[in-house]
Image (cartoon, rainbow, N blue to C red):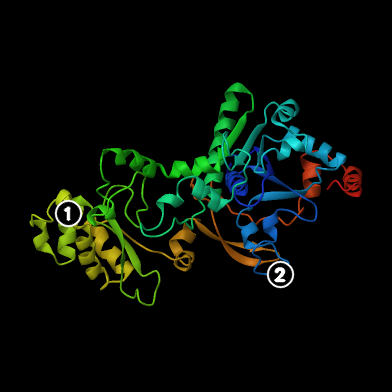
């Protein structure tokens, strides 16, 4: 007896009008959960990322493949009348439309939200935009622009240096995750109301949401210095805005990135070490400073704050005698919070991440085998399999037949008209 495993979003059909990263992140996640994601692409061109940052000539780039798993591709010329008719029928047959075009692009195509509601009142129309309503709502936004406009860059880096963006794609992929949550929430509400609705995720909003602890600190500044920041122990005055805090911990516990054994040759031979108050006595024992447990200059968090530089210098003297993994093995049983700085190479080779499907190997007909991220969200009764990204227009005929009921003659006519 074969057990049929239902996916969480089985039966939900997504009309994917997205490109580059923010939108495809959203629709890929929905595809991992079992939705039928129909990616609409321009004939002969497709998503711009198919050709960006290619490492193999004339093969879809890793940029594209790693953002478009579990999707079907249909090519469609929406400027052609027949193409518009096909697009209209797709709207009728789908549950969700997702887009991240420049502001007003779909309106100019003749598919405003009001028009979409007329075509399919149950349609959920989800958009990623750079900014929400306001003075910049018509501006285009890319990843690093979002990090800057959302407050991340102004609080990232060291006090004596310029603002920095992070390597994490918090603007694009982060907003895509927000949009996916908005979509499934709207789908849930539709079960009660029977109606679709608009879902908007702004990249600026998404980045700011992830910077909430920095907004917290902006308000704390009104009542005095941020004592857990390194600049307080270095006796540097605070200004009127949340400063760049280097590698200080945002949670209020003093933390710092420290060198480990081999740091001279290995740029990632470092560990993050948190001098948590609850573990202070164990820290003193581990680093060979047992007298600090009772020393009036170090025994309590309050007296340690002005001396954090000295504290971490002493801790680093110890971590430099151990590898980052040895630091973790020694400290974790003692409830001392530490974390090795793991490189992309180390992460890609970590067996446990393969076992959980966090990193997966995928076979592609043109590229061969490559690594990609899997679903970061695990459901006990709805496993996620990562299927390769589609070739351009690979499923055009199948979608026309299965979703719209086209026969061979209708497909041939649409092709001859240049609609697909």
Quadrant position of residue 67: bottom right
User: Looking at this rendering, what residue extends furthest in the top direction?
Assistant: 193
Q: Which residue is drawn at 75% across and 32% down?
A: 92
Q: Name the residue under label 2.
A: 57
Check disc 2 and report its element: helix, strand or loop.
loop
- Earlier sequence position, callout 2 versus callout 1: 2
- Relative placement, left or right, of 193 versus 207 is right
Badge 1: residue crowd in 10 Å (few <14, some 14–19, many ≥20): some
Mark identifier at residue 304: 1
- Relative placement, left or right, of 150 versus 415 is left
* Residue 71 image position (x, y, % from top left): 67, 49
* Residue 98 image position (x, y, % from top left): 65, 40
Residue 375 versus residue 247: which sits nearer the camera?
247
Q: Which residue is drawn at 27% across and 72% down?
A: 320
Please identify, in this view, whether the residue under mark 2 or under mark 1 is nearer the observer.
1
Quadrant position of residue 197: top right
Q: Which residue is drawn at 57% across and 46% down?
A: 29
Residue 87 to residue 317: above or below: above
* Residue 77 image position (x, y, % from top left): 81, 46
Check disc 1 and report its element: helix, strand or loop.
helix
Q: Distance between the residues labelled 2 and 1?
A: 57 Å
* Residue 344 seen in this snapshot: yes
Mark identifier at residue 273: none
* Residue 381 seen in this snapshot: no
Residue 88 versus residue 379: which sits nearer the camera?
88
């Amino acid at each position: 007896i074969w057990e049929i495993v239902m996916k969480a979003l089985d039966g939900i059909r997504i009309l994917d009008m997205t490109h580059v990263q923010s939108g495809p992140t959203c629709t890929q996640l929905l595809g991992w959960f079992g939705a039928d994601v129909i990616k609409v692409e321009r004939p002969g061109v497709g998503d711009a990322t198919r050709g960006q940052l290619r490492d193999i000539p004339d093969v879809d780039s890793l940029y594209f493949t790693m953002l478009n798993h579990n999707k079907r591709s249909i090519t469609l010329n929406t400027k052609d009348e027949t193409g518009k008719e096909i697009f209209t029928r797709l709207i009728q047959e789908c549950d969700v439309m997702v887009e991240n075009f420049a502001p007003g692009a779909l309106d100019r195509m003749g598919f405003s939200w009001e028009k979409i509601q007329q075509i399919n009142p149950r349609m959920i129309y989800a958009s990623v935009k750079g900014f929400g309503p306001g003075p910049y709502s018509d501006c285009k936004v890319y990843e690093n622009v979002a990090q800057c406009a959302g407050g991340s860059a102004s609080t990232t880096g060291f006090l004596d240096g310029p603002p920095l963006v992070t390597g994490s794609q918090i603007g694009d992929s982060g907003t895509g995750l927000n949009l996916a949550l908005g979509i499934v929430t709207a789908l849930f509400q539709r079960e009660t109301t029977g109606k679709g609705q608009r879902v908007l995720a702004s990249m600026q909003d998404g980045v700011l949401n992830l910077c909430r602890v920095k907004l917290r600190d902006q308000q704390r500044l009104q009542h005095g210095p941020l004592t857990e920041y390194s600049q307080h122990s270095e006796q540097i005055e605070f200004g009127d805005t949340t400063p760049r805090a280097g590698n200080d911990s945002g949670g209020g516990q003093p933390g710092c990135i420290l060198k480990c054994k081999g740091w001279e040759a290995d740029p990632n031979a470092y560990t993050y070490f948190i001098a948590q108050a609850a573990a202070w006595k164990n820290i003193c024992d581990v680093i060979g400073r047992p007298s600090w447990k009772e020393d009036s200059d170090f025994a309590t968090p309050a007296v340690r704050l002005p001396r954090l530089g000295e504290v971490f210098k002493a801790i680093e003297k110890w971590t430099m005698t151990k590898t980052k993994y040895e630091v973790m093995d020694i400290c974790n049983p003692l409830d001392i919070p530490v974390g090795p700085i793991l490189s992309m190479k180390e992460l890609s080779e970590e067996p446990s991440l393969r076992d959980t499907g966090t990193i997966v190997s995928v076979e592609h007909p043109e590229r061969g085998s490559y690594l990609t991220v899997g679903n970061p969200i695990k459901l006990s009764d709805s496993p996620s399999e990562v299927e390769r990204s589609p070739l351009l227009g690979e499923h055009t005929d199948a979608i026309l037949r299965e979703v719209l009921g086209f026969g061979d003659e209708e497909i041939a006519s649409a092709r001859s008209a240049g609609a697909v």
